[in-house]
Image (cartoon, rainbow, N blue to C red):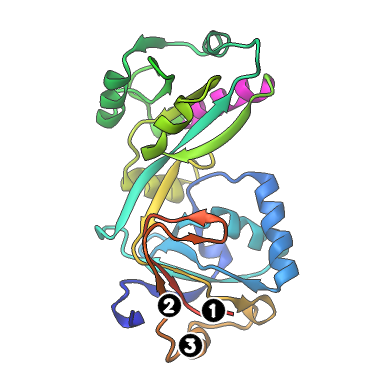
Amino acid sequence: MALATAGFSLGVRPVASLRPHEETIPRHVDQLAAEMTRDGMQRDPIIIDGESAGVLDGMHRHAAFQKLGIENAVCCSVDYSSPSVKLGRWARVYAVIPGDSLKSVLEGVGGVRRTSLAEAFSALGRRDVGAAVLTADAAFVLGGKMSHEELAGAIVSMDGLAEARGWERTFVPEDDVDVPLQKPGRFVLLSRRITKEDVVTAARSAKLFPCKTSMHIIDPRPVAVNYPLGELESATTARLKSRLAGKEGRVLPPGSVYAGRRYKERLILMDEQ
C-alpha cells in the first residue's frame, strides 16, 4: 500500500503537546518503559486526533515517554471525523473468587436495577444509563443518564470493589462480551456507548476516562516504525519521512496478530527490522 493513499500522516510531535483521554495502568507503563529502554526504540506510533492532539491509542506509550523523560515521539495523526476511524468500547471482566457473589458487589453500588440483557444493551446504546453489569442470564443497570465524570466515577467504583475482594480483572472488546459470560464466576461491566465528542472532551479537559474504556479501530493502522530512542531528541518530521522514504510498508489483513494482540483492522508495517 502506498503511504500517500493510506489516509494518515506520520510526524514527530513534542510529548508535552499530546493530550491523553484515559488513565493508564501503572504496571503496564513500567513494563513498556522497560521494553523501550531494552530495545532502544519506539516500536509503534502514538495515534492522535490531528485537530485536538488528543491521544486515541497509545496512552501507555505516552506515559512511558514521560516516565523516561523523552521529549519527542513519532505520532500518527488521523482525521477523527473520518469513517475509517471507528470507536468502540472495552468491557471489564471480573472473575469472582469461589464463595463470593455478584450480590456482594452490587450492595456497594447505589441505584442498581435488575433487567434483561436485551434491555440493558438497548439502554446502553441509547445512553439512557451509564453502565451495566452483565451476567449469563440477567443484567443490572447502574443509575440513569450519566455525565462523563459520573460514568468515570462509576467504573472506578466498580474496579475498587472488585480489587478489594481480590477479583481478577481483564478486558475484552464489546463484541466479545458473550465469551466470558459462558464461564462460571464471571461477570462483565460495560459502559454506555462512547462518542468521539466524549473522547475529545476528555482529552481537552484532562478529566480522563478510566483505563481501557474506549477502543479505536484505525484502518489502516501504521505499526513498526522502529524509531531509535537515541535519535528522538533531535528528530523532526522531515527526518522521519526521509527514514521511511521509498518504503511501501507490508500490509497485514484484519485479524492478524501483531506484538501479541489481534487487530480487527489492516496493519501497515512501516519499517520491519
| CA–CA distance in space, label 2 to label 1 | 8 Å
**Point 37% across, 65% down: residue:** 253
Question: Three-letter amino acid code at disc 2?
Answer: Arg
Q: Residues within 10 Å of mark 2 (few under 14, many from 20)?
A: some
Q: Residues within 10 Å of mark 1 (few under 14, many from 20)?
A: few
Question: Three-letter amino acid code at disc 1?
Answer: Glu
Question: Three-letter amino acid code at disc 3?
Answer: Ala
Q: Earlier in the sequence, mark 3 or mark 2?
A: 3
Q: Earlier in the sequence, mark 2 or mark 1?
A: 2
- Asked if the magenta segment contains residue 10, the reply would be no
Q: Quadrant of residue 231?
A: bottom right
Q: Which residue is mark 1?
A: 272
Mark 1, secondary structure of its residue:
loop
Q: Nearer the viewer, residue 196 or 116?
A: 116
The C terminus appears in which quarter of the rendering? bottom right
Query: Is residue 105 toward the left or the right of residue 49 in the image?
Result: right
Q: Which numbered circle lies on residue 238?
A: 3
Q: Is residue 62 above or below residue 153?
A: below
**Residues drawn in magenta:** 152-164
Q: Is residue 267 above or below residue 209?
A: below
**Point 35% across, 31% down: residue:** 192
